[in-house]
Image: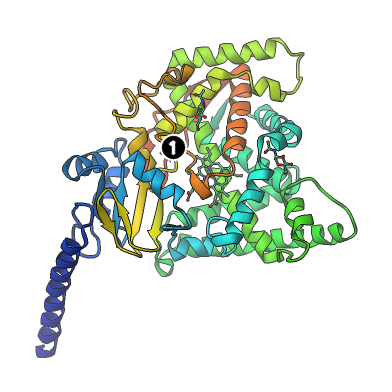
Amino acid sequence: MAIFVHYLSILLISAVIFLLLRAYRLRRLRLPPGNLGLPFVGETLQLISAYKTENPEPFIDERAKRHGSVFTTHVFGEPTVFSADPETNRFILQNEGKLFECSYPGSISNLLGKHSLLLMKGNLHKRMHSLTMSFANSSIIKDQLLVDIDRLIRLNLDSWTDRILLMEATKKITFELAVKQLMSFDPGEWSESLRKQYVLVIEGFFTVPLPLFSATYRRAIKARREVAEALSKMVKERREEYEKGERKNDMLGALLGGEWEDDQLSNEQIVDFMVALLVAGYETTSTIMTLAVKFLTQTPLALAQLKEEHDGIRLKKSGSEGLQWSDYKSMPFTQCVINETLRVANIISGVFRRTVTDVNIKGYTIPKGWKVFASFRAVHLDHDHFKDARTFNPWRWKNNNLGTSCSGNFYTPFGGGPRLCPGYELARVEISVFLHHLVTQFSWVPAEEDKLVFFPTTRTQKRFPINLQRRR
Ligand code: HEM
Ligand SMILES: *[C@@H]1O[C@H](CO)[C@@H](O)[C@H](O)[C@H]1NC(C)=O
Ligand SMILES: *[C@@H]1O[C@H](CO)[C@@H](O)[C@H](O)[C@H]1NC(C)=O
């Protein structure tokens, strides 16, 4: 008992010293103002409970009002500088690799694999990022990818019944598209069993990062191993074909191919790279497809205008003629709908970075090694930057009439700087083609009330069940 009391007092005294030192250090540091909350947990619980509701904005609004748009908090185990300021966000994105580095918890790195683009740094990152960009640039989409995007989306919609879970149906679509684009496989048993494992991996990203306590996380790690095995077998076969002179025009072909003559990528590197591409493109694009439909359903005027645009395109075509690049380029209202969905949904609500040196921003100093969070969501939903920012209004994008002076720096659904999303154009095309076939072939009503939630990811609670009717 005496020993216990002794330990307890040591613990208490150290906690007090810790808090005093922290307060002292912070005061000396010229950090952005803020509140670190309780020791260890900080303000994590407030953040989580806000993001589990339909309206998470107060978490940032209140702090920004009290401390300014750049403030200090303490979330997910660490003090963190939060930015709701477009200029600061831009500064953070542009200085990636110089003043800041991306930063993921170990549990996520394990699932991604150490050679994934999201974790790469330095020159290798630069090279692989530009390779990924050139794989998904507009001329490649136009000349090679669009045909299959059109065909596979149509194939999926043909199999729809009169009631579906839209979130599930769109995930199947984006996964099949990714597998086709990466390694030229058409959907079938192989891709479907890969997808089942894949879903388990994705679930692992959103569990508490305490692997020992989480069955979901352990299952995700196991599934990740199986995905890697399947891919690795396929990469091996393709490398053998490649060495015999057989070339395929897909992402894997580019990874195996020419410009890597001197220092070829290992199979493990290629597999990690592909896993990360699947992760980055699958859940994001399908969520935007689903949320676009949700917002349109709630905004009948916008849906009517969208239908008119796409019926017009169909009218000029015979029966089942596929969409061309020129069709994609003549969907101005669709682009407004997609921009507005990205702006309001904020499926990537911002990005975490870590300072690699002491960084001065707006007269404050963020010490080396600190976490920062550039919140895109806070900027996209700020009334100072977008008029009536919290309402879905696709018309605001017409003639770029945003109700504000300029949008360039304010609108970053795909990030920016050296880590700009390499899939930004591909995602737009996939969503456009999806909306085209959806509105020309079906009308629908929501089958149940379904709410948005924002933690751990942005999605609807019930995966958006809808009742469908064929238009023709
Ligand atoms: C609507 C759909 C999408 C959204 C909203 C989105 C958003 C983003 C954002 C914000 C980033 C920056 C992350 C950071 O700076 O740390 C990013 C990175 C990335 N995205 Fe996307 N993305 C989408 C679709 C796609 C697709 C279809 C692909 C597949 C080609 C893709 C591949 C990637 C990759 C590989 C990265 C990492 C880039 C790097 O770290 O260098 N994304 N995405
Ligand atoms: C797209 O990438 C290809 C290489 O994959 C390149 O030849 C072409 O010039 C690029 N096009 C554009 C518009 O950047
Ligand atoms: C949509 O946003 C992009 C920036 O991501 C912009 O370049 C484009 O002009 C916008 N489209 C419309 C129709 O305003």
Residue 2 in the figure: left or right of residue 362: left
Q: Is residue 223 visible?
A: no
Q: Does residue 60 appear in the picture of this structure?
A: yes
Q: Secondary structure under badge 1?
A: loop
Indicate left or right for 23 with 425 as reference: left
Examine the rendered structure and indicate whether residue 459 appears above or below residue 97: above
Give the residue at x 45% y 15%: 300
Q: Looking at numbered disc 1 in the image, what kind of residue is underneath it?
A: Lys
Q: What residue lies at 29% left-to-right and 29% top-to-bottom?
A: 384
Q: Quadrant of residue 383?
A: top left
Whether residue 369 is situated above or below residue 245 in the rendered picture? below
Would you name the residue on which mark 1 appears? Answer: 462
Question: In front: 445, or 293?
Answer: 293
Q: Position of residue 372 (x, y in %)?
A: 34, 54
Q: Is residue 109 left or right of residue 261?
A: left
Spot occupied by residue 183 in the image (x, y as percentages of width and height) = 74, 49
